Structure formats: structure tokens, C-alpha cells
Image: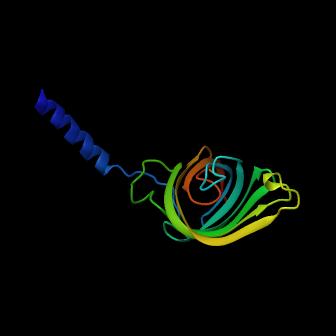
Amino acid sequence: MKKFHFAFLLVLGLLAGTQSFAQLAVDKGTKFLNLGIGVGGYGYFSGSGIGLNAGLDAGIIKNVTVGGLVGYRSYGSGVNSFDLGVRGSYHFNELLQLGTDKADLYAGVGLSYYRISYGDYYAGIPGFSNSYNTVYFLGHIGGRYFFTDKIGGFAELGSSLATLKLGVTIKL
């Protein structure tokens, strides 16, 4: 019985290895637009507010995209943050030999300008306002799944205004 299982698995593996699987092509000129919401975060205000974000990635060479991102998040009590950055991603579809042209797995790094501002009534103190600005490095890992040739959903973990971003992705 063990020989049959081994032989069956061997034949199945050989057949799978000789098939050509289609992967989502990420080539020069491929563009993705992400529109979403973000939850979670870092620091004192990490658990409050839902962020809005948008990003555009464009293929510069095979399996590599660069792009920009923008985000806004209100934490309530007059506290708001804004994020504007650039990033690059490597798409693992070909490397992982994904068996579908509907999925896209990627990871990357970037650089972002971040501003958080505290409004007039922050902490119940009339007239109090302040802001904090910084530039920081980003890291992200994510995936897209296309329901049609052009429209899909995305999920992304990483740094920015939110730890988890979810939304709609459009292939331009």
C-alpha cells in the first residue's frame, strides 16, 4: 500500500511539474490603484479611528513596481494624522509559481512623511494645539485577488497610518 501511495504522489508531482501555470504578469507599465481603509497602528492612538488610504504602483521592470501612497486618519478629540510616501515592491507571483493569474503576492519598502496634529480641544484643554512631523521607513507585505480582469480586493500588513489595510484594487 505504501508503494502505491508513493507511486501515485510521484506521478502526480511529475504531471504537476510539466504543466505551465499562468501567473499574474507584473511587467513594465503594469499599474495598480489601491483604495482602502486601515485599522490598527502604532503608539498611543493605535486602537482608535479608521484610516483612509490610496496608493498607485507602476511596473518599472518585470516583477518590480514603484509608487506612491497617501493616507488620512482621524482619531477623534481633534487628533488627525496624514501620511504621504513613496515605495517599491517585489511581486512573488513568478518566483512562487502561483497557479492562477488572479492572485498577486508582494512585499517591499518605502519612505514616508508623517504628520499628526492635535486640535484646539485635545485633552479637554481649550486653545491647545500642536503637531508632530517625521519621515520614516516603511515596510509592507500584501496580496491582491482579482475577481475580474480589472477589479479585485487587497489586504496589506505593514507600516503607515494603519497596521492592516483592506480595500479595492484596480488594474489600470
Q: Residue at x 67, y 61 (%)?
A: 55
Q: Is residue 60 above or below residue 163?
A: below
Position in image of residue 160 (x %, y %): 62, 60
Q: Residue at x 61, y 49 (%)?
A: 40
Q: Is residue 86 left or right of residue 17?
A: right
Figure quadrant of the C terminus: bottom right
Q: Nearer the viewer, residue 42 or 21?
A: 42
Please identify the residue farthest to the right as the structure is shown: 127
Q: Residue at x 26, y 40 (%)?
A: 12
Q: Is residue 46 left or right of residue 16?
A: right
Is residue 65 visible to the viewer in this orientation of the structure? Answer: no
Position in image of residue 76 (x %, y %): 78, 49
Position in image of residue 26 (x %, y %): 53, 62
Colour theme = rainbow
Position in image of residue 90 (x %, y %): 48, 65
Figure quadrant of the N terminus: top left
How many discs mark residues in the rendered view?
0
Please identify the residue farthest to the front as the structure is shown: 125
Is residue 120 visible to the viewer in this orientation of the structure? Answer: yes
Q: Is residue 48 left or right of residue 120?
A: left
Q: Residue at x 85, y 55 (%)?
A: 121
